[in-house]
């Protein structure tokens, strides 16, 4: 992997860490500054090497596999194509991380658990960063107050530079922690023309027939809300119904998509 000739030395210099500054790379968000005995690997369920960019549609099942060679606390951060950063945590924000035993593999989400996390992501390449530390890290201050969605906790920071800067403060001491990255692409199938919903209206609803999956129709309307300036707050997904809440500043709208055979009922309701 070719490293950019860029480091975050300036971010860490004020903390007295300039002599061991991490670097940014084309795929890896952070390369740990000091090579130590602890190692961590992260990959998706469609790429055993961890070096590829597998594709996932809205209805696909995405899993992350992490493995360490020593007992460690592991944290997974996802950076989407728009720069939004989420901490992946099975039970909401886990300030103490996920403890992983040496030479064992941890899966997120847990086997058998459905996760609508893919429904909250825009199209494009996502990067996932695994941070392993011998001791717990306090990441609570990075989380958006009261925000959690589908096993993911949105963070206040944006982009890989923002995450690098935030971790430079959280990860102390600099010795001992280690990182690894993987990436994957979120894709969409062209569904053709879909009826329009107005997010400015108190409530708007449409009914139509379409040869499509529930997750595909939900993702299509979620993309329209993103284009209008809304970001996902939470999402829930079942066999015949998918719901989500989106926010733009103080405004919130609820998206409700129901499927029966080829028929879809889609409702958008303003909450505030």
Image (cartoon, rainbow, N blue to C red):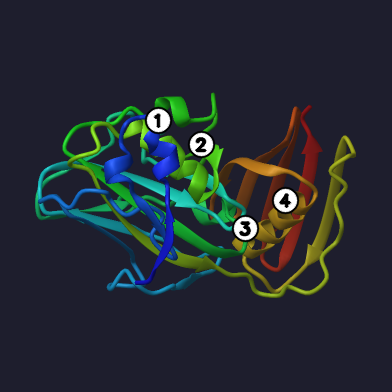
> Which structural element holds mark 1?
loop
Q: Quadrant of residue 101?
A: top left
Q: What separation in Å lies between label 3 and label 4 (alpha carbons)? A: 8 Å
Report if the CB atoms under discs 4 and 2 are less than 8 Å apart: no
> Which structural element holds mark 2?
strand
* Residue under numbered circle 3: 122
Q: Is residue 51 visible?
A: yes
Q: Is residue 195 left or right of residue 120?
A: right
Q: What separation in Å lies between label 2 and label 1 (alpha carbons)? A: 23 Å
Lower position in the chain sequence, tag 3 or tag 4: 3
The structure residue drawn at horizontal position 10% and vertical position 55%, both measured from the top left corner, is 103
* Residue under numbered circle 1: 14
Pointer 1 local density, CA inside 10 Å: few below 14, some 14–19, many at least 20: few
The structure residue drawn at horizontal position 64% and vertical position 64%, both measured from the top left corner, is 216
Q: What separation in Å lies between label 4 and label 2 (alpha carbons)? A: 18 Å
| x and y, in percent, of residue 182 in the image | 37, 63
| x and y, in percent, of residue 99 in the image | 20, 39
Q: Quadrant of residue 12?
A: top left
Q: Is residue 229 left or right of residue 153?
A: right
Pointer 2 local density, CA inside 10 Å: few below 14, some 14–19, many at least 20: many
Against 157, residue 55 (above or below) is below
Between marks 2 and 1 in the image, the one whose residue lies nearer the viewer: 1
* Residue under numbered circle 4: 226
Marker disc for residue 155: 2
Give the camera-side residue of 50 and 162.
Answer: 162
Give the camera-side residue of 133 and 272.
Answer: 133
């Amino acid at each position: 992997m070719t490293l950019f000739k860029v480091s975050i030395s300036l971010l860490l210099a004020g903390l007295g860490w300039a002599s061991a500054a991490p670097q940014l790379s084309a795929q890896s968000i952070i390369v740990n500054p000091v090579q130590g005995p602890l190692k961590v690997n992260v990959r998706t369920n469609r790429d055993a090497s961890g070096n590829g960019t597998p594709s996932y549609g809205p209805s696909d099942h995405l899993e992350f596999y992490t493995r360490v060679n020593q007992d460690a606390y592991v944290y997974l951060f996802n950076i989407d194509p728009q720069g939004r950063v989420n901490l992946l945590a099975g039970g909401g924000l886990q300030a103490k991380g996920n403890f992983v035993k040496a030479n064992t593999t941890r899966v997120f989400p847990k086997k058998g658990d459905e996760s609508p996390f893919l429904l909250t992501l825009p199209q494009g390449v996502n990067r996932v960063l695994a941070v392993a530390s011998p001791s717990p890290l306090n990441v609570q201050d990075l989380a958006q107050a009261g925000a959690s969605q589908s096993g993911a906790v949105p963070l206040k920071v944006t982009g890989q530079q923002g995450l690098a800067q935030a971790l430079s403060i959280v990860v102390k001491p600099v010795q001992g922690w280690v990182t690894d990255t993987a990436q994957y692409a979120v894709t969409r199938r062209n569904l053709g023309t879909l009826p329009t919903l107005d997010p400015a209206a108190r409530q708007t609803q449409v009914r139509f027939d379409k040869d499509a999956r529930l997750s595909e129709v939900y993702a299509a309307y979620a993309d329209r809300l993103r284009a209008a300036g809304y970001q996902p707050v939470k999402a829930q997904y079942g066999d015949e119904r998918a719901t989500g809440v989106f926010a733009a500043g103080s405004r919130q709208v609820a998206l409700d998509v129901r499927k029966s055979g080829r028929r879809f009922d889609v409702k958008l309701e303003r909450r505030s």
